[in-house]
Amino acid sequence: MLKKIAFFVSSLNVGGVERAFVNLANSFVEGGHQVDFIVCQYIGDLRSELDPKINVVTFGDSRLRNSILPLYKFIKTSSVDCLITGPTYPNIVALFANFLAFNKIKVFVSQHSYQDIEMQNLGTVGKIAPLLIKYTYNFSHKVICVSDGVKTDMIMNYNVKPIKAVIVFNAVIDDSFFSRSKESITSLIPGKIFNKEYFIAVGRLSQVKNYPFMINAFAQLKKSVVEFDYNLVILGDGEEKENIQFLIKELNLEESIFLLGAFSNPLPIIKKAKLFVHTSLSEAMPLVYIEALALKLQIVTVKNSGANEILKNVKQKEIVDSHDQDQFVAAILHRLDKNFEDEELPDLSSFYSDIIRNSYLELM
């Protein structure tokens, strides 16, 4: 039976949640379903990634906190069967709006991260979020947890009823994934980067991503390994950009480390990299691990819950302690001596968009 489905996020800026939702929304349309994509502000590079058959609903320049009433009016007057939302604050707004509409539709709130580290630097807002989760999430139809660790976290620490919490992975790989990875990147990246092979890192420039650790490890490699001759490319934007730029300059690495910003389609840049490196202190279900593996990159990452869960049976990886820079450096050198095809390839079928789409349809 075909469904009418709506998605709700604050914008279409490049981010893991937004990218997963765009992939999933496109998959629903491909399956013949009707899709509305609701945004507070119709901004962001991911606008070009939405299927043209998707109906975009925008609240103008409304900020997220001012979106409860516009979303309530949409719910009250629309004929959609369900609303899929994320991350945390859009989830809470959607539940309040649906409550005002006397819980007219099924709301699927999706939890993509752990709250502890993510909320440490948000002050009062960070302190309020856990309370709001505890008092609102159980009013959803289901709490979609993107990993087993997130499900446990929601049940144990946020009072989500076990019957409400279900695990559904992020939609990462769709029909266009590999064709998009073959697009030309000569117009996207300064030519000097191609003078050497490079490592790739992807993620917003925030404290939780632990970029100083990565950059200092890269500096150690440049200083201590004579034959080391690689660049480091970082894709992402965020509030720590100036601090990261200052550190790169302080270490005299401006000609070796490049901050290229966020891309709606980072796949061609990822594909041509020699190695994928990741230093985030907190991850639940990072799309970038799956993208890197699908594009046959080996991974060196610091230990986090997402890495432990997603990569536990993957051969093409090294997981090291998040505070041990020497170990991280050694792991990179060890992986440079390996070849992806020499090891058993991981099964990534659980992350295909059509599989995820069917999981949602079963819940509906």
Image (cartoon, rainbow, N blue to C red):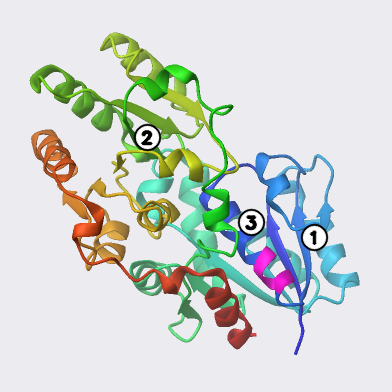
Q: Secondary structure at mark 2?
A: helix
In this rendering, is residue 215 above or below 151? above
Q: Is residue 255 left or right of residue 217?
A: right
Of labels 2 and 1, the one closer to you? 2
Q: Which mark is residue 71?
A: 1
Q: Secondary structure at mark 3?
A: helix
Q: Quadrant of the N terminus?
A: bottom right
Residue drawn 32% across the image and 59% down it: 306
Q: Is residue 128 left or right of residue 37?
A: left
Q: Which mark is residue 207?
A: 2
> How far from the left and from the top, in percent, is residue 128?
51, 52
Question: Between 71 and 287, which is closer to the camera in this rendering?
Answer: 287
Q: Residue furthest bottom?
A: 1
Magenta span covers which residues?
26-30
In this rendering, is residue 323 above or below 353? above
The answer to which of marks 2 and 1 sits earlier in the sequence is 1
Q: Secondary structure at mark 1?
A: helix
The answer to which of marks 3 and 2 sits earlier in the sequence is 3
| Residue type (three-letter) at the residue carrying disc 1 | Leu
> How far from the left and from the top, in percent, is residue 145?
46, 70
The answer to which of marks 3 and 1 sits earlier in the sequence is 1
User: What distance separates the C-alpha of mark 3 from that of mark 1?
Assistant: 10 Å
Q: Are marks 3 and 2 in contact (CB under 8 Å)?
A: no
Q: Is residue 198 left or right of residue 170?
A: left
Question: Between 80 and 3, which is closer to the camera in this rendering?
Answer: 3
Q: Is residue 88 visible?
A: no
User: What distance separates the C-alpha of mark 3 from that of mark 2?
Assistant: 22 Å
